Image (cartoon, grey):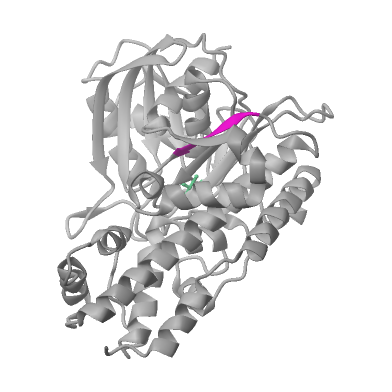
Amino acid sequence: MAFNKDQFDSIIEEFTVDGSRLHEVAADFRYDLRKGLQDPAESSLRMLKSYVGLPTGEETGEYLALDFGGTNVRVLRIRLDGHGKFEVLKKVAKPLRVEGIYDFVGEGSTAEQQFDFIAELVDEAIEGDHTTKYLLGHTFSFPSEQTNLYNAKLIIWTKEFATKGVEGKVVNDLLKEALHRQGIDNVEPTAVINDTVAVLLAAAYKQEDTYIGSIYATGHNTCYFEPFADKAERPMILNLESGGFMKLAPNRFDAEFDAQSEKPGEQRLEKMVSGRYMGELFGMALAELLGEQGSKYGFTSIDMSNTILDETPAREEVKAIVKAKTGRELETADCELVQQLASAIVIRSARLVTATYVGIIWQLAGGKAIAKQHIAIDGSVYEKMPLAKENIMRALSELLGEDAAVVDTVLENGGSGLGAAIAAAMSQE
Ligand code: GLC
């Protein structure tokens, strides 16, 4: 074996969230939630109002849905048939960046370029029809300050986006202007929602007892339905921007990665748990084990997934992945340690994410019995990363004990598009 076992053990230890820490994170999250309900400035959770409640299931009709939240932008034409039924009539998708060809997410790009590109995609979805009236729901998956369902201002880019001239702007105004420049005046954007809100709307359209919506993918964030029992507000979904949760114990890899990121100090939870970042943390820890501290290898969460899944006796897959990214040939015993490292990072991620869900569940229960409920989750990490789901379930049991029996998680695949269409329908209620 080439790796130093003591060094390895201490790295694993740094990525471990034990039972008592898990409880602390859940309790701290609930504390921030309570504080945030009184005054968001006192909390690391943004508690952004969505101005939308839960759907009744009666929402029907044909709508356009724009899903803008990562490098891949999608526009869908969707017909809602009520009570969870719907049909996607048309779907177009394009990346906002193609390496070496164009880039509408980097700091060299402008709001006009970005939204013109999106407006062209809308044009494709309506197949050049500039007469039929369409309402458009816009899933815009970045922290936005809303004053109503239409008016959402981007507070700050996350997920390493850096396009100039969007922060501080009303995104639907930018979209409307771009649509107008393309001669598309028959499409009216009427609603903007976060992707977590879209997931919750889509799931609640299909089944009752769903109050929490979450994205566990490139980015991570959660929203929930706040009943405002004290009548301070009308009941509505709050986007927590939980990726910005701060009451955590970042290890030195987290701290070092944060310092080099696009927005140091922001999105501390997201940088510890989401798909965009886990590969980076894995690479940093591996660099230490290889005696190449500071090297950037560009591991992705897909590499981690393939690493964990390799069951070949000689760990051929792990060897190939490590060779391709670092140029180094590992012995089988070291490959097994590399698998443990990847697993530890994924397990930490699932445990931290679950602690935040439980913080919300506790807050909603308000000291009374925990209601039967589903947590709706969308995203590649939840769906595809080995160990993620089972560790969510395990952490739910650890935190909730017997009450874990009334809580389950459901995959709400593609909720961003469906949710946007539902929001467009709800904008007319
Ligand atoms: C980032 C965004 C948030 C979004 C999440 C998942 O955390 O700030 O708004 O919900 O990514 O896409």
Left or right: residue 7 compared with residue 308: right
Q: Position of residue 35 (x, y in %)?
A: 78, 50
**Quadrant in which the N terminus appears:** bottom left
Q: Which quarter of the picture shows residue 20?
A: bottom right
Q: Is residue 46 visible in the rendered structure shown here?
A: no
The magenta stretch spans residue 64: no
Check the image and report above or below for 420 versus 67: above
Q: Which residues are magenta?
A: 372-377
Q: Is residue 334 visible in the rendered structure shown here?
A: yes
Check the image and report above or below for 246 versus 130: below
**Quadrant in which the C terminus appears:** top right
Closer to the camera, 77 or 243? 243
Closer to the camera, 192 or 151? 192
The magenta stretch spans residue 374: yes
Left or right: residue 28 compared with residue 162: right
Q: Look at 47% across and 39% down and name the residue there.
A: 377
Check the image and report above or below for 14 versus 274: below
Q: Position of residue 323 (x, y in %)?
A: 17, 76
Q: Position of residue 81 (x, y in %)?
A: 40, 9
Closer to the camera, 265 or 313? 313
Q: Look at 52% across and 8% down and name the residue there.
A: 58
The prevailing secondary structure element of the residues shown in magenta is: strand
